[in-house]
Amino acid sequence: MSGGASLRLIGDYVAPMDEALSVHSPGFVDVTDGRVAACGPLSGAPLPPDGAVVSNVGGLVMPGMINGHAHSAMTVLRGAGEGLPLERWLSEVVWPREGRLDPDDVEVGMMIGAAEMLRNGVTTSNEMYFFPEAVAAGVARAGMRAIVGIAIIEGLARFGTPEAQLEAGVALRERTLGNPLVEIALGPHSGYNLGDDTLRSIRDEAIARDMLIHIHVAETPTEGDAVTARTGRTVPEHLDDLGLLDARVLAAHGVWLTESDMRLFAARGVGVAHCPGSNGKLASGIAPVRSMRAAGVPVAVSTDGPASNDNLDVLEEARLALLFARLRDGDAAALGVSDALHMITREAAAALGRNDLGSLEEGRAADVIRIDLDRPEYEPIRSPSDVLGLLVWAGSSRDVTDVWVAGEHVVDSGVVTTLPLDDIRAAGRRIADRIAG
């Protein structure tokens, strides 16, 4: 909340997403100046601060979910190219349509995506897309939190050289330093698309300015073959040889990481964004999530873009992550409820190097969601911990009713309060028709 105002939320159940996966019943969360001031069982709560607004919201209160890898402005391309594998989907459908986008289109697409995510209980998204200033503007209008990656890619003349893209990204970062909801990152497309000198320049800027590097790695089994043929190394090994992994890095996908790649990522503190729905739709494979985490790699369950998923529902992805891991390993204990929930909250924050997010612990951002439990699928609740298992296996993001970002109430009783959704959706339909050609 702004201006020093304080808020106390009281839930029938409060799950702060701490390491122990505690559930307080009933519980409270105190918010001051957009941050969590206290959280715990209501029976031990201090008196609320003078002038605090006390709201008994009931239901389940927990941190907002984090989307570790997305291209959310692609809402205007949703559904295009169904049934095509990744390479054909990109070259035949996505890239021609993206070539017709302008900054206003991207801002509209991002607002549609932000509204969808907020309604689904996602309060932070790690984005990578063209026209990053438009992405940041769309996020700001929605009142959502985002890491906005500057897409840096070879072969797209309309955006200039990779060096020019990098320079523009650094300049945007300087212009947005005062915005507490937007962090600017560097988004090199991949180790196989960009040259070594460009990757070294990105490394240098990222380290000097403490910027996240958000990069696609090992999404398909053959994408890194040219790098391996040239260097004798896997793409992660090559990125490390260039010093890129000395920066703060989030690697998207990681489907085809080797065991040595995973150990390398763990040693360098690299996080991985796991996109089970997108990887399944495009038949890219099933990432070795259990092995990654066993090696010490933090994982953020993510949606990827709405053109390849096709929704922006992180809770659904958490359920898919459990199912795919169990199928991959042939083991019903491969991943559990606590793993799923941590990978969309505190572990996702760790994967992004953002330990100010992801839990309702003192000092962290007051990004909070309320889930309605007054539904048949949440029966029976025989103990407080049952709530979390029911959320993952039986619940839905449609059960999210209220969302606060930095203490600001941006979804109220299921309605996104920050955007004129009817107008934005109509604009999105016009853009989709135009770019389809």
Image (cartoon, rainbow, N blue to C red):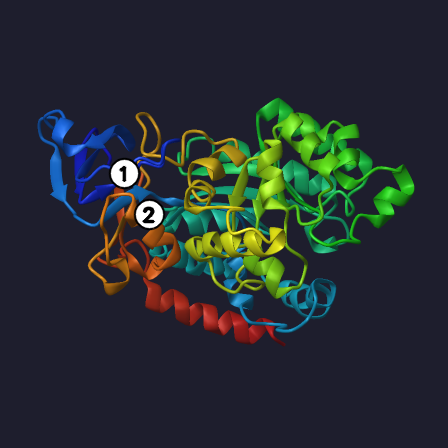
Determine which residue is flagged by label 1: 23
Disc 2 is placed on an element classified as: helix
Residue type, label 2: Leu
> Where is residue 87, by image quadrant?
bottom right
Number of numbered discs: 2
Can I make out residue 352 in this image? no
Residue 321 in picture, x, y percent from top left: 52, 52
The residue at the point 42 percent across, 54 percent down is 315
Which label belongs to residue 241? none
Of residues 316 and 127, the one drawn nearer to the viewer in this rendering? 316
Judged left or right of residue 10, residue 101 is: right
Residue 257 in picture, x, y percent from top left: 71, 43
The residue at the point 72 percent across, 38 percent down is 259
The residue at the point 52 percent across, 66 percent down is 76
Task: Say few, some or many: other residues with alpha carbon within 10 Å of mark 2 (under 14 / 14 to 19 / 20 or more).
Answer: many
Using the image, determine if residue 294 lies above or below residue 390: above
Report the quarter where the N terminus lies: top left
Task: Say few, some or many: other residues with alpha carbon within 10 Å of mark 1 (under 14 / 14 to 19 / 20 or more).
Answer: many
Q: How far apart are the alpha carbons under marks 1 and 2?
A: 9 Å
Judged left or right of residue 79, residue 38 is: left
- Marks 1/2 in contact by CB < 8 Å: the verdict is yes
Determine which residue is flagged by label 2: 388
Residue 93 in picture, x, y percent from top left: 67, 70
Can I make out residue 322 in this image? yes
Disc 1 is placed on an element classified as: loop
> Where is residue 365, by image quadrant?
top left
